Amino acid sequence: MLEISIEKKLGNFKLQSNFKSDTGVLGILGSSGCGKSMTLKCISGLQVPDKGFVRLNGKDLFDSEKNVNVSPRKRNIGYVFQNYALFPHLNVYHNILYGVQRLDKAKRHDKVMEMINKVQLDGYEKHYPSQLSGGQQQRVALARTLITEPELLLLDEPFSALDSQVKFMLENELLGVLKKNYEGIVLLVTHNIEEAYRLCDRILIMDNGKSLQLCTKDEIINHPTSLEAASISGCKNFFEVEVIDEGDEFLRITSKDLVLRTNKNTSDYQPRMLAGIRAHHMHLSPYYIDKTNSFECKIVDKVEGVFLTTVIVNCMGSTLLVEVPKDDYINIINTNSPKFWIELPGEKIFLMKINK
Amino acid sequence: MDNLNLFPLYLSLRVAFTATLIGFICGLPIAYYLCRKQGRFSDFIDTLTNLPVVLPPTVLGYYLLVLLGRQSWLGKLLEERFDIMLVFTPTGAIIAATVVSIPYLIRAAKAALSEINEDYLNAARLLGRGELNIFVTIMIPIAWRGIVSGVTMSFARALGDFGATLMVAGSIPYKTLTMPIAIYNSLLAGDYKMANFLALIMTSVAVLVLYIVNRLEKKMKKG
């Protein structure tokens, strides 16, 4: 179990991070400069927080009140840096050996060879980091830290240094290596919601130095609790709404001329709230949709992506971004329909408090 | 060429090698200190170690003479307690050469050490190594080109020193007469053969040093 609650000021920036994590992969998601990497640095001891504590499996690693600050080399924490930080003057074998040099010769040789085998780098022992591909470098970095049997593994943007076409394969590989060889706590920093969703069990959202929400990855998609959390997790549609009616399982809300029915998912309602819906959760059709929350709308503009087309529609005075598979969009347009309809499924609308 | 006296060449090489070695042993820790710490004291040390570059060698030699001479506190102590005399000895020449040459080594080593990506050092820390261990196993191997380039420069400077050496060690034939001073003396005596020969040696060394430094710096940029 990792528990942290830290504060650190750096110029105008203030980091306030507090969360708990058990075994499994916790993704720390946030835009660049939000303090994700700084959080990892504070946990590992490379940066010293101003206040607070860092506790790992019951041991105090840092505690400003008890005046405890364990040096990084004694924290038993594994860290994979963004650019992997492989020692350029050492070959693969010696890079991996670096953390276990204190063991006796025969034992450490066996350990290194076993580790090289586990990360599928047999035959690369004598290669230098500059001779390896990005994915291989990543596996060396992982092997180098896993061989020290860390209690906590920190991965700082492990895929940002890689080409996008190999990323997907490597994500799978990394997950495989981790699941097979590591049972401790993993923190993975990323700014990419897709990456976080694919790799992590749970997600912590950070914004502007603060940890906002920690929950399972499905919760973050379906029920983000704040505007920041929702937009960091990729939501594009927000509107301020008034709650006008309340049923047993539903709420009726209104925004401008739009009147919507939504599922009740939190108990804490205020008269004015912020509603959000993800662009791919809405349906666009050239025909009348006979469902609740369906409205006539106008197509204002479109932005073509690789596989999805983002359609900007005006619906009763509100602008909405709808994502439609490219082919579907072509089919919709080819009907030459003078009118379009849009459905905002009630169960996909989430309500958040308005931050003041 | 029978009357060619090679003692100055031999002495100069001995002085330069020894001065470079001492400079390396003392300069590297100073460079390490300067690249790790930032503050008023390290700024002061930085300025102090760069002073010999700016100060005229004769002035520097004069200060050394005042500091180490037989009248000074240190000179007296060394002479009375240990029977060591520094001025007008080869040791004095070595001290003068060390002081004039060490800034080049410190400067190059400091630049090379501070260029090292902090992540390498952090990775090593998290893999359980102490700072001194990291200095030896990571920093020196990564920065070796810059360090060697500094060593080469400081060797060249030590080999070529005239003013400071003359002030501290004098120009006693077969004792403290180094090559640059010998060139001067040969010219004064009208011995052009000797002057040309020594000048040629000095020039070759200088060209070789520049070549080595350039090669290393190019490679450093390539990484």
Image: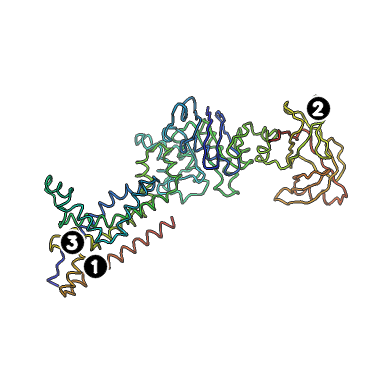
Horizontally, is B23 left or right of B78 in the view?
right
In which quadrant is the C terminus of chain A drawn? top right
- Assess disc 2: are there few (<14), some (14-19) or many (≥20) residues with their C-alpha within 10 Å of its C-alpha: some
User: Is residue A144 or residue A270 the one in the foreground?
Assistant: A270
Distance Cα–Cα, label 3 vs label 1? 12 Å
Three-letter amino acid code at the position of disc 1: Ile
Q: Nearer the viewer, mark 2 or mark 3?
A: 2
**Chain ID for label 1?**
B
Identify which amino acid the numbered label 3 is placed on. Tyr
**Distance Cα–Cα, label 2 vs label 1:** 98 Å
Q: Secondary structure at mark 2?
A: strand
Residue picked out by circle 3? B10
| Nearest the eye: A8 or B19 | A8
Q: Are marks 2 and 3 on the same chain?
A: no
Pointer 3 chain: B
Which numbered disc, 2 or 1, marks the residue closer to the eye? Answer: 2
Q: Where does label 2 land, which residue?
A: A246
- In the rendered image, residue A235, in percent from the top left (x then y), is placed at 70, 41
Q: x, y (%) of residue A13?
A: 55, 41
Label 1: how many residues lie within 10 Å, few (<14), some (14-19) or many (20+)? Answer: few
Q: Amino acid at mark 2?
A: Glu
Task: Work out whether mark 3 precedes mark 1 in sequence or the reverse, and give the earlier one.
Answer: 3
Q: Are marks 2 and 1 in contact (CB under 8 Å)?
A: no
Q: Are marks 3 and 1 on the same chain?
A: yes
Task: Quickly name the residue at label 1.
Answer: B201
